[in-house]
Image (cartoon, helix red, strand yellow):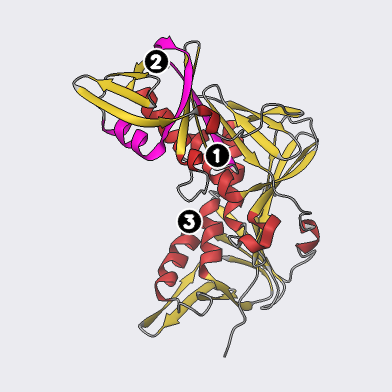
Amino acid sequence: MKFTCSQTSLLKAVNMVGRAVSIKTTVPALKGILLKVEGNELILTGSDMDFSVISRIDVVEAEEGSLIVSAKFFSDVVRKLPNAMVKAFSDDKNKLSITCLDSHFNLVTASADEYPAIGGETFGKSFKMNNKVLRNLIGKVSFAASIDEKKGVLTGCLIKTGNSFVEMVALDGFRLALAKESSEVAEKMDIVVPARILNEISKLLSENESAQEVDVSIEEKKIRISTSDVTMVSRLLDGEFIRYIDIFPKMYKTKVIVSREEFQSSLERASLFVAEGKNNLIRLKIGEDGIEISSRNDYGNVNELLPAELEGDPLEIGFNSRYLMDVIKAVNDEEISLEMTNSLSACVIKQVENSSYQYLVLPVRLSV
């Protein structure tokens, strides 16, 4: 195998596939990056079997071949090379020689035959999605998925399509996030993708903003998302997702409209004095004058009044500050509304003008 390319393009590709490499795997080959030269392309693959990233870059002076190289050492070497042309060559002695200007490295390699098949070559349903739309959905929802692996399907995000829309949902038992975007997707599907992997996919797509559309393909157990220079393959989660529509309250007795930016700033100040280990409690006392936000711990307390527009009954209610902050950071509207029934019922946070997203947050029981 032989190829020549720029250090910049090689480093970008290595960083991309490195996101999928696991250092904790019991499969030695998966601690490496698979390098394969086909025609005038270098194809790099990183995988932990749940998530795989494949990146392609143009090369010259190419000779076809493939091998596995240590992800850690290959990444470290490429990162430290000068910004110049990189020449790489492998012989039949399990060695990859790398030269860049006056720097010379030799890395031990393994046979490409040892790399497990990651699948994802053949898919059934296929459609295109706007890059920004997909990233926006992930950003508005993924934080609400459970991080407890014992909760199975709840560690993922439901992706539902049909009738020219894409809907994404996540919940962990304490909160629920739902977002919907218009999209020219004719295929109907309901799949669940691990939230951890969706976050990695979003980061990779943000590095490929020049690709306005991405190709999405589905098979029974995997989803593949591709741009012109990177392909991401994720396993799908098994299990039936909760009937989330039934969870949202059908009515409210208290509704308050507040500036999102001012609310976020107040929550950040109040979060300075939440009592750790006690549900990160923040109190909201909602009345005609606005929202009185307060918190206290053994080192002090904070209390401030935030202007807000009240509809319905006054209410005092408590929340885990982190759950509220996660929601506020996920949206960018100027104003948001909070709808509640009583101090023990869930709060629904949504847009004032339309309903492209909805969040449900369970309250914390208040003591006297």
Q: Is residue 101 magenta?
A: no
For the residues labelled 1 and 3, the Cα–Cα distance comes to 28 Å
Mark with earlier residue (1, 3): 1
Secondary structure at numbered mark 1: helix
Mark with earlier residue (2, 3): 2
Q: Where in the figure is residue 30, as x and y percent of width and height?
A: 50, 40
Quadrant position of residue 108: top left
Determine whether, in the image, residue 205 is placed left or right of residue 257. left
Q: Where in the figure is residue 177, as x and y percent of width and height?
A: 65, 55
Q: Where in the figure is residue 315, as x and y percent of width and height?
A: 64, 77
Which span is picked out in magenta?
Answer: 51-80
Observer-nearest residue: 37 or 219? 37
Name the mark nearer the viewer: 2 or 3. 2
Observer-nearest residue: 271 or 84? 84
Residue 197 visible in the displayed image: yes
Tell me the quadrant of the picture where the N terminus can be found. Answer: top left
Reading the image, the residue beneath label 3 is 261
Residue at far front of view: 93
Tell me the quadrant of the picture where the C terminus can be found. Answer: bottom right
Amino acid found under the numbered disc labelled 1 = Ile
Residue 62, placed above or below residue 145: above
